[in-house]
Amino acid sequence: MSGKAGRHCPDALAEYAAGVLAGPERTAIEAHLLDCAACRGALGGWTAVAEAMTAPAGTPPEPASVVRAALTQAALAPQPPPARRRRAAFAGELLLAELRLVRPSVWLASVLVMTCAVGLALTAGNGAGATVLSLVAPLVAVAGVAGVYGPERDPAFEALAVTATSPRVVLLARVTLVFAYDLVLAVAASAVVQLGAPRVGLAALVAGWLGPMALLSALSLLLAMWVGPNVSMAVAASLWVLRVLTGGIPQLTGGWLAAAMREVWVTSPGTVAATLALLAAAVVLSRHHLRPGGWPGPLRW
Amino acid sequence: MDTGAGAMPVPDRLRRRSREATCPGDPPVPEVDEVLVSRVADGDTAALAALYSRYRVGLFRFLERYAGDRMLAEEILQDTLLAVWRSAHAYAGRSSVRTWVFGIARRQAHNRLRARAPEQVPLDRVAGWADPAPGPAERALAAAHREVIAEAFDGLGLEQREVLALAFAARITHREVAEILGVPVGTVKSRLHYARAALARVLADRGYAEELP
């Protein structure tokens, strides 16, 4: 708007031409138009536009038909699934995504160690399989769980730090993946060992490693979040060495330490309860340490 | 205005407002609209039909003009009703139902039209044309047939088409257009001026108002 016309022309000229003004606004413009040739001229342009815009006014579809069509469309293209199904789908997607982010060496090392254990168990015979598996399976799982998280171990650390998914959920997804993988691996190893030496049942074989594996993994997770993966690995390895020594060196098998290790290294209500308690502690800890968008300070990763 | 609310029990207070609203100009009646939206949210298909009936003329004019094609406009209309049906529960009353419905229609249209939008007329080409005084724009527009203007309109960019279609085809006030587009009223007015200037420029390029520079 410029010059003399700017003073005269109300902004509402276009609205007047469109026919949306009523009452005093409309009256005021009409009075102004009588006196102002500039506005009459400007109105001509707007009126031409308004007429062109409404010219071939097609009849809108009937409510019944268009509503029926929309509802049919709604039935054919189902609504985005309700929250629960979306959450399930999200969990699936997250697990798949994390599957790609866990370093291949984690998968490979587990298979290698477990294969060695199976070979050892089969050649040893005489029921040594149960002992071998009860020692190796927990170690494999602990190594995986402790080493699965943290900047130096995560190829997508920076990307994860800015995603909407909370680091806790990511951590949980990875631990679940690694633990499930090691679980399957250990069950498979047990089956192979059982085939080679059928004297011990499969259930007994699994019971030999399942409890300690879960307990040590939970401890390892808690320590990894609390003080870091290296300390976690060291503590877990120490426990493991203690178990091996107290079980393997005759002079140590009678002591209180050996008795304690035997208590811990089984699948029992006690170890299950301890595992759950450690997991709960890890979840509580993760609430403090792993906030979305903010990475744990105390762990100095 | 066909309120379409006859099939539903509407509180007396709202019924009274509804009758008052059937005077020329058809201003929306917020309470009736909101009752309808909450019923749509509850899965009442008759309420959806009633809501559509209240706005169908403006809505369809807008979509037909914006899309430039009746078939496409009907498809977008269907998309719009589907979106209204599915998102009625999320209507929070922050805007009027009318601007909410038109906002949905505009987004649905945008989804479909984005892919085939023609290039916008560059602003530097129309800058001198946005003067509302009877000048080149008025002469070009006045000289052209309405069909020719409509054809020129189809060549404009989405931004200019949507603002012209809302203000003139759907006959919505500039304040409401601003709400629908999520821009200040001043922006609506300046977009309208530029859109009109762009139309005039297209017409001038086609030989109307040949005396222009």
Image (cartoon, coloured by chain):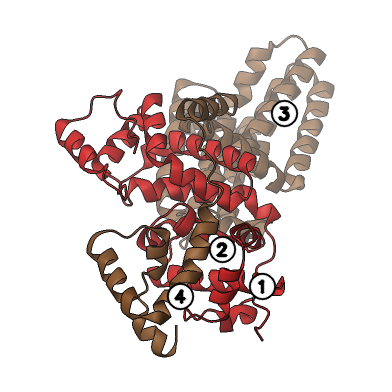
Q: Which mark is residue B208?
A: 1
**Marks 3/1 same chain:** no
Residue under label 4, please give it: A42
Mark-to-mark CA distance, 2 and 4 = 22 Å
Residue under label 3, please give it: A185
Q: Is residue A23 above or below residue B78?
A: below
Q: Nearer the viewer, residue A195 or A108?
A: A108
Q: Which colour represents chain B?
A: red
At 76% from the left and 47% from the top, the residue drawn is A105
Q: Label 4 sits on what residue type?
A: Ala
Residue under label 2, please give it: B159
Image position, residue A73 (x, y; %):
57, 28
**Marks 2/4 same chain:** no
Q: Quadrant of residue B74?
A: top right
Please say whether residue A283 is visible from this viewpoint: yes
Q: Quadrant of residue B39?
A: top left
What secondary structure is found at the residue carrying circle 1? loop
Say whether residue A200 is left or right of residue A256.
right
Q: Nearer the viewer, residue B187 or A155?
A: B187
Do the residues bearing badges 3 and 2 touch, measured as CB atoms within 8 Å? no
Image position, residue A236 (x, y; %):
58, 44
Please say whether residue A135 is visible from this viewpoint: no
Chain designation of label 3: A
Judge the density around disc 3: few (<14), some (14-19), many (≥20) Cα neighbours within 10 Å: some
